[in-house]
Amino acid sequence: MRVRVRAFHPFPDPQRRTLLRAAACAVPALTASCSRGRDATVRLWAMGREGEVAGELLQEFERSSGIHVRVEQLPWSAAHEKLLTAFAGDTTPDLCQLGNTWLPELVALGALEMLGARVRASRVVDAHDYFSGIWETNTVEGDLYGVPWYIDTRLLFYRRDLLARAGFQAPPPNWGEWLQMLAAVKQSVGPDRYAILLPLNEFEPLLALALQQDEPLLRDGGRWGNFRSDGFRRALRFYLSMFERGFAPPATNNEIANVWNEFGRGYFSFYISGPWNIGEFKRRLPPELQDAWMTAPLPGPHGPGASIAGGSSLVVFRRSRNKDAAWRVVEYLGQPAAQRRLHALTGNLPPRRSTWNDPALAGDIHARAFFDQLERVRPAPQVPEWERIANEMRLVVERVVDGELAADRAPAELDARADRILEKRRWMLDRAQERMKTG
């Protein structure tokens, strides 16, 4: 699952909705309950697998609270458009599962309720118990708009048997040693196999390397691209070197017949991926290879490196008529017991450190690296346009790998594309500043 902006509102609320209505398709109005207290009905939108299990997770809550939760399942592929259409038509639910990269966009629209005061008053939601990088994805301009529900990040899956055959007994601690390992593995496996898979249709591996740098990916409050910075150039050079030296195949994952089978047969030995693949590798690799693979945090330039702060959060919509009841749902799903249950049903990783004391997680040798990595995650730029910019990053880098664009021209090309995407944002921010100056 997989967005972003500053919490300024350039248009009054009615005008924002009018602008969206012009682009949105008309939808039938959905009835929202006006009831309060123990007889309230709360509408929850949830996506994907989480939407399938949310009703089961909330059965005990409904029995004990008297609050009915009507779960409406949305496919991830349609969820973003559905949310914007619902905002334009004043049919948003009471609360929603929201990919944390989408949150700044809905904040910019004025669609979400601020939750800081509720968190401070809560005996359940303890901000200090959450991984700080994940918590930060829910904060825009210092205000909190969401509570993390589950988390996602990227790290190394690797074949430790093939690494040992190449002469190494532990995963790489930094970029320099990682390159040494990749070179040794490539020499060991031969010309028809590779050391690492970096699918060209995924921007996340390069993004993770870029987030390890000191310089931000956007500058001046998200007005301009910053891909010509020394930090991004360093990350890009390192990423491209794995293709240039033949460590990675110049392919998308659609060109790999089956990622799990190819990992099992040793077509590649390193793979940057997320927690869902723990279960996939356990299910798909044969028994004789179950001890041959392991996970490890991403190495950084000089030591342990940062990675992406991803996942989904729970948000309350500003126009909800049942905010108190909706907040009680957020609190319930935020309890460690509920998070453990979500992990058991879906494999999703919990955002609270205390939940990781559960034996099922503490005893999972493949999940341990994720706990370590989650202490070093960073959010992507919090602007609504980020996903479009990230897609341009993917397209430009694919052109470089395919030989259609010189590597030294890629940062300037990325800045130019990002600046075009951010043009409207700059105009809106400048207009907002002018209004503030003139009172």
Image (cartoon, grey):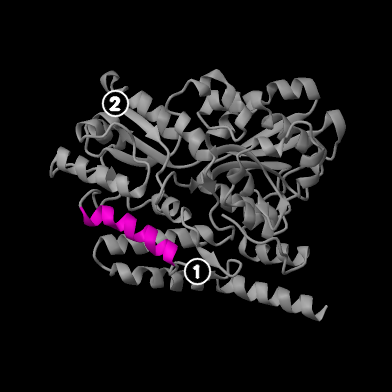
Which residue is located at x 76 percent, y 37 percent? 327
Label 2: how many residues lie within 10 Å, few (<14), some (14-19) or many (20+)?
A: some
Q: Tag 1: residue type? A: Gly
Compared to 257, does 141 lie above or below? below
Asked whether 205 falls inside the magenta stretch, the response is no
Q: Tag 2: residue type? A: Ala
Q: Nearer the viewer, residue 308 or 231?
A: 231
| Residue holding disc 1 | 225
| Residue holding disc 2 | 292
Residue range in magenta is 230-245
**Disc 1 or 2, which lies upstream in sequence?**
1
With 249 as the anchor, is 174 left or right in this view? right
The image quadrant of residue 51 is top right
Compared to 181, does 334 lie above or below? above
* Residue placed furthest toward the front: 302
Which residue is located at x 73 percent, y 58 percent? 110
Q: Label 1's element?
A: strand
Q: Position of residue 190 (x, y in %)?
A: 13, 41
Compared to 352, does 299 lie above or below? below
